[in-house]
């Protein structure tokens, strides 16, 4: 289903792109002291999510795609941790919609992984 698809047609890629936009907008308000700290880390982790989805979609096997989906999921967990730190350190309030989009992104990625793994086991 996903293999050899244009990554731009995948819901996981689309929603993670919207997450990147939200993270960039939010981090514009971060203190200047965090310019090379959490601001950079938040942006890097957010960008990594759709980037890994795109790279995985360009691979020639479901197993490769699954590997890159796990990388995207790892970046999502990293981003979630950094958002918690941003809030805990009182650097800025993290808008609820960012967490909602992040959780939705993770759900979709997990669903894709489950689907691709189930396809693999059905072939055996």
Image (cartoon, rainbow, N blue to C red):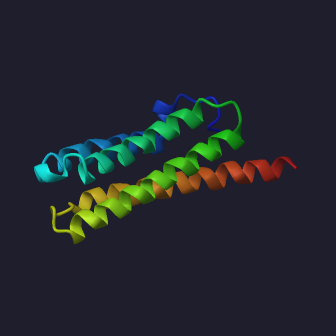
Horizontal relation, residue 101 to residue 97: left or right: right
Horizontal relation, residue 2 to residue 107: left or right: right
- Where does the image place residue 116, in percent across and percent down from the top left? 68, 48
- Where does the image place residue 25, in percent across and percent down from the top left? 19, 45
Residue 19 in the image: above or below residue 60:
below
Q: Residue extending furthest right?
A: 124
- Where does the image place residue 60, in percent across and percent down from the top left? 69, 30
Tally the marks.
Answer: 0
Q: Residue extending furthest bottom?
A: 88
Horizontal relation, residue 106 to residue 39: left or right: right
Q: Which quadrant of the view contains residue 21?
A: top left
What residue is at 30 percent from the left and 67 percent from the top?
84
Quadrant including the N terminus: top right
What residue is at 35 percent from the left and 44 percent from the top?
44
What residue is at 62 percent from the left and 52 percent from the top?
113
Horizontal relation, residue 121 to residue 90: left or right: right
Between residues 69 and 92, which one lies in front from this camera angle?
Answer: 92
What residue is at 44 percent from the left and 40 percent from the top?
50
Q: Which quadrant of the view contains residue 102?
A: bottom left
Between residues 101 and 73, which one lies in front from this camera angle?
Answer: 73
């Amino acid at each position: 289903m996903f293999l050899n698809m244009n990554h731009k047609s995948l819901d996981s890629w689309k929603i993670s792109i919207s997450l990147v936009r939200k993270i960039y907008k939010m981090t514009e308000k971060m203190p200047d002291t965090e310019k090379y700290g959490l601001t950079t880390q938040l942006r890097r982790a957010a960008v990594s999510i759709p980037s890994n989805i795109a790279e995985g979609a360009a691979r020639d096997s479901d197993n490769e795609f699954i590997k890159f989906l796990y990388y995207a999921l790892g970046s999502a967990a990293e981003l979630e941790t950094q958002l918690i730190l941003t809030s805990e350190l009182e650097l800025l309030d993290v808008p609820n919609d960012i967490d909602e989009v992040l959780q939705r992104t993770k759900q979709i990625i997990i669903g894709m992984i489950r689907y691709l793994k189930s396809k693999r086991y059905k072939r055996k």
